Image: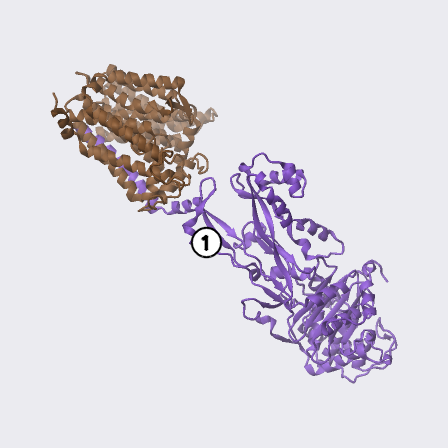
Amino acid sequence: MPRRNSIVRNLDWGTVIVYLLLVFMGWFNIYAAVYSEDHSSIFDFSQRYGKQLVWMGFAFAMALVVLLSDAQIYSVFAFVIYGLGILLLISTLLIGREVNGARSWLHIGSIGIQPAEFVKFATGLALAKVMGQQGFKLNTFGAYLKVATIILIPALIILLQNDTGSAMVLVAFVLVFFREGMPGWVLVVGAFMALLFITTLIFDLSVIAVALLVIALLVYGLSTRRGSDVVKALMLTLILGVLMYVGTSIMDLEIDTFYYFVVPLALCALVALVYSYFARVQHAFFVGGFVLASLFVAFSTDFVFDNVLETHHQKRINDLLGIEDDPLGWGYNVNQSKIAIGSGGFLGKGFLAGTQTKFNFVPEQSTDFIFCTVGEEWGFAGALVVLVLFGTLLLRLIKLAERQREAFSRIYGYAVVSIIFFHVAVNIGMTVGLFPVIGIPLPFFSYGGSSLWAFTLLLFIFLRLDTNRYVH
Amino acid sequence: MNRRSVVIAAIIVLVLVTIATKLFYIQVVDSSYKFSADNNVLRRVTQYPARGLIYDRNGKLLVANKMVYDILVIRNQVRNLDTAMLASLLDITPLQVRDAFGQLRQQRGYSPRKAVVLFKQVSDSIYARFQEKMFLFPGFEVQPRMVRSYVRPIAAHMLGYVGEVNEAMMKQNPYYQLGDYIGISGIERSYEEQLRGVKGTKIYMVDVHNRIQRSYEEGRFDSVAQMGRDMTCTIDADLQEYGERLMQNKIGSVVAIEPSTGEILAMVSAPSYDPGLLVGRARSNNYKILHRDTLQPLFNRSIMALYPPGSTFKVVNALWGLQEGVVQPSTRYACHGRYPIGRGVGCHNHFSPLNLSQAVQTSCNTYFCYVFRNILDNSKYESIRQSFDAWANAVRSFGYGRKLEVDLPNELGGVVPSSSVYDRVYRNVWSSLTVISLSIGQGELLVTPLQMANLVSTIANRGYYITPHIVKSIAGQEGIMPKYTQKHHASVDSAWYSYIIAGMEQAVNGDASSGGTARWVTLPGADICGKTGTSENPHGNDHSVFFAFAPKDNPKIAIAVYVENAGFGATWAAPIASLMIEKYLNGEVKRPWMESRILNANLLDRRAKKK
């Protein structure tokens, strides 16, 4: 029995304990969220808390099976698992059942599962397989194309199922790429563009243009210490702006005010781009390109917002940014969620004493909005405990990932971190009004077999790989 | 460790700290979410108290409460509604049922998940019928409400009525909420705060669909409704009822006061109406009918009608003349059928010459023209303005020309002119002859029947009155407002009253040769002192006026009677007053011939005819 002993000895019991804590806390909070005096037993299997106990039993069994399985199969069969996942997704698209506008449920007998949940770890495995191959480096177009394809196939199918939230989860793999050598500026620029997208929704383009000019000149000036170039660019922009104003006045043209800011800035950036290309000045080239790209994003924001996003996405974003206030309409969920959490105070109202979640003011209170029950009944203290547990889990997983000797295990470990982190940040962020409402569950907490099983498999496959770290 | 793993760990920590900060803000710093949570989950259900009962001065119940039933409906629980059956159960047409459903949406705070009032104030017999079939009407509920019920159909104006609060009332007083009842007129309004009681609240916890889940904190924060305070009013119900019977088919008013206390014994305004008409579902319809009636039954003539006082006012001029010393009790003036100076004032046939008491007794116009001119042309004053205003102030000291502040709403104050009025009208050129009509209570004088009764009460008291009032006692409350126990002294010494009272006594009780104006209404043993009046007015025939008190010594009742357009005071007003006095002092009337003459008289059609 040496092998089994080694599993018991090498298993990261700390992570397992945090996992169990989260699952049981989730169960108690589901009980509190849907509690009714008619069904007061937590073992009442007609109720969600009773069912969740069954799902938990299955989940623990799955975890055990994973731990007892051969660690090699996940690497060997990574693509097979991925392929099965894609097949499930496609069949869901064809024969699945529509729930809340998303065709994401597959029914086998009386049990319904959400394949999108399982595709997350399958994609993680496939990514780890590709990126863990000998000599794979994220520095060629071909390499990016490969990983992008692995992510985009499931993402597109999930989008076709009309389940935007689950599709967005796959964006989280950016963290894996970053760990595996993607240049840091991609992350920064990506974050910047997202910020730009949001600020453009709030502020006028002329304000954005001025801000971009200031940022670009600051970055260039500070990185090159060439004040004269800064002055030149500033003068050029100003002169172009004045010329444009005089020109349009003479020609009696009526144009929107922001053009007087945007057009000179774009021309100035173009000049910098062309000049620096021929003069081989790298900094100026990057800054010029950055300004042009930013202007493009800012300009296309309104288009994307109005034409690409759907109405409920627009409303949720507007609500979050305070552009539109509608606490009984689109803002209802978040408003009620904040009321529930906010009314908890520092120590909370106590177990089963929450009123907002219990009397159904909060929607989806046992699934996507389960954190409301935590906030209402256990207060800031309880919410903080949950946050600390998730933080501990994530940091612990990073540590585990870093101690892997095999690239496959490390990359898969980061995939686990990315997915759990994305879920936690977006789910809790949405309940407290920091993020637009996206229907994704809180890992280990939310009611639902599919999500609990998927997260359990996701985590325990990594833990199994981790127990194998001394082999080879 | 890999540098990038540290960056990733840092990003994770940063995001989690941001979330924790936001959590701290909404859970610990910002308290507004707690209020929102309470608003979400707590529903306050008002417990309506019963209004206080109203008794008459002898403890007879006048106003009680009865149950009616509001029929409520939860719109989205209604299934397979049988409109025709519902209509027949509720005694209405199917169209009315449809209308009621159509109007639901316009209610404030309407929700299809909440019980809202569909039909208001259904009677208990209809409720009993509906209740048996209620199982056929899912989504329907019944809520009991208390409304007024009247033991006798009397004293409508004085008691007033109760109605639902409107927007303006709710804005003015935050105690009231939609659906509350409030006293709109009469006692119900002036003693609203005592009668209404205190509303209670039951706090329930509701779910998102507004369905009651359970009571909040086991009812620890509930408050129980407290019933309104019972009230005893000064009215003698039997006297009031008798007065209303006497005044049937007449227009006018009777006000009777107990002089020693200022308590109003009866307050009749004719035509009147059954107060029960303004209760329940029929109220708005009945109100419309009463409102359109050309005889204005809703108008409380006792405190709102303004009449010229007529000859009854002579007693005031006599008193002020005596007080000013411009006439002595023994002063005699001759009367040959008219006052001969200026345009002159006509008089009727009586013996001559006569002294002051005899002038009161016979109501001699000529005599009081002399008296009034003496008052205004008094050499004590530098000008007629001063003497006139001194007179006007004396008249006001009897409670004329201003509100008496009876405890009923909408009282009017009447008119006593000042010299400046005549300065304006006559451009400063006027004399005692110009205003000679005032000597016999005509001209620019207007009083309410209540003020008339108060004047005779002042005479009965020999010089003071206590503000007339309707409240005798309120349960659980010590005494009544001090303003209803204070004496108001008129500016005439009490010694002078005996001469006036002697004249009033003779007017009713004098022998056949004395020329008393109301001898035929004398009541043996009652010693009624009275004064007739015939008040000319621009609306038609003269008003028949009489005021009196009895008995002469230690008076028990002071009464003023106005019968509009009925002619001489002695003909109609005097017998009505006499019968009222008999009823009050003796408890029964033993002059059936006089009583039936009054009861059978229909004086409504005299209104338009000018003599």
The answer to whether residue B229 is seen in the rendering is yes
The answer to whether residue B123 is seen in the rendering is no
| Residue for badge 1 | B222
Would you place residue A359 above or below residue B200 in this image? above
Direction from residue B49 to residue A458 in the image, left or right = left
Would you place residue A276 above or below residue B109 in this image? above
Q: Amino acid at mark 1?
A: Asp
In the rendered structure, the colour chosen for chain A is brown
Q: Residues within 10 Å of mark 1 (few under 14, many from 20)?
A: some
Instruction: Name the quadrant containing residue A167.
Output: top left
> How many marks on residues?
1
Residue at 73%, 76% (x, y): give it. Answer: B550
Residue at 73%, 51% (x, y): give it. Answer: B292
Q: How is the image coloured?
A: by chain
Q: Nearer the viewer, residue A184 or A11?
A: A11
Instruction: Estimate the x, y position of residue B417 in percent, counting from the top left.
Output: 71, 68
Instruction: Name the quadrant containing residue A434.
Output: top left
Direction from residue B133 to residue B607 in the image, left or right = right
Q: Which chain is purple?
A: B
Would you place residue B503 above or below residue B562 in this image? below
Residue at 68%, 66% (x, y): give it. Answer: B237
Instruction: Name the quadrant containing residue B84.
Output: top right
Could you say whether the residue bearing mark 1 is in a helix, strand or loop? loop
Q: Residue furthest front?
A: B132
